[in-house]
Image (cartoon, rainbow, N blue to C red):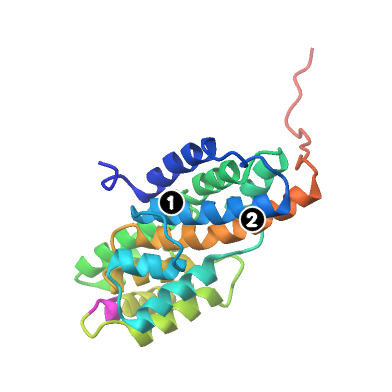
Amino acid sequence: MWSDSAPLDRALVLLPAAAAQMPRVWALGRDAQLDNACVLIRLLAAAMISAAPSNEPLHKQLAAAWGVRNRAQVNLLRAALVACADHELNASTFTVRCITSTGTHLFGAVAGGLAALSGPRHGGETARIAALFDEAARATDLDRYLATRLAHHEDGAPGAVISGFGHPLYPDGDPRARLLLDLLDESAPARSPLAQVQRLARAVHDTTGAAPTVDYALAAIERVLGLPAGAAFTLFAVGRVTGWIAHALEQTSDGRLIRPRARYVGAYEAD
């Protein structure tokens, strides 16, 4: 039953339960916080891959759970974790910092980060890209398929690009995606959908001018290496948790509550 649940669901159940059993979860000392951080990382990885907690490096844990034995492919998983570790104040990281600023513990802050990461406009976009791969593979005319998809304005937003393309911070292309896709090209199995993944990326770029994002690269790794469904999100979450922890520790040392202000600019009702 537990192994049949989604990786995110397992993590969101396990982390609060584990926090309740940790006597020093609220400790503010540096050593205690680092101890808690190490436990949290191990538990999150275990929950995401439905395995027992381990002291092995994270990329090796994922590789073992997913049956990846080729050294270059194992190193690709490690590169994906590193590429996902931190990305400034994105939505999930800012969420973690806001929650941490209230004085709660790491487990609570990371649970909030996971909830934010899961949204389809953040780490959850990898699931939409997996669906895109399936649809594109079935299309008899890829260019026509993309034109039809764009004509219907994906997400209901006029001018929206295809899922996994056009990161707003990288008009010249997401460097994380370039790195991971190059490594995937070097390590892909002889018989794999790599050519389909590359063809789709070229077709979208030719049609829209948009380059792949890191979400596309993670979904491509999942598909080309034949990893379990949701592995792309797991790579994102397990990699990003280390960055969240670093932000949380920094926020704790700052000691201030994050409290943005708002100014009402709407209409006023006359008396």
Residue 126 x, y percent position in the rendering: 40, 59
- Distance, label 2 to label 1, CA atoms, is 41 Å
Q: Residue at x 38, y 77 (%)?
A: 74
Q: Quadrant of the N terminus?
A: top left
The magenta stretch is: 192-196
Which residue in the structure is indicated by mark 2? 34
**Vertical side of 234 occupied by 224: above or below:** below
> In the displayed structure, does residue 90 sit left or right of residue 255?
left
Nearest to the observer: residue 26 or residue 252: 26
Q: Mark on residue 155?
A: 1
Q: For the residue labelled by badge 2, is the local secondary structure a helix, a strand or a loop?
A: helix
Residue 4 x, y percent position in the rendering: 26, 46
Q: Residue at x 41, y 48 (%)?
A: 8
Residue 101 x, y percent position in the rendering: 72, 43
Check if residue 28 falls in the magenta segment: no
- Total labels drawn: 2
Instruction: Give the mark nearer the N terminus: 2 vs 1.
Output: 2
Q: For the residue labelled by badge 1, is the local secondary structure a helix, a strand or a loop?
A: helix
Nearest to the observer: residue 166 or residue 103: 103
Residue 45, picture quadrant: bottom left
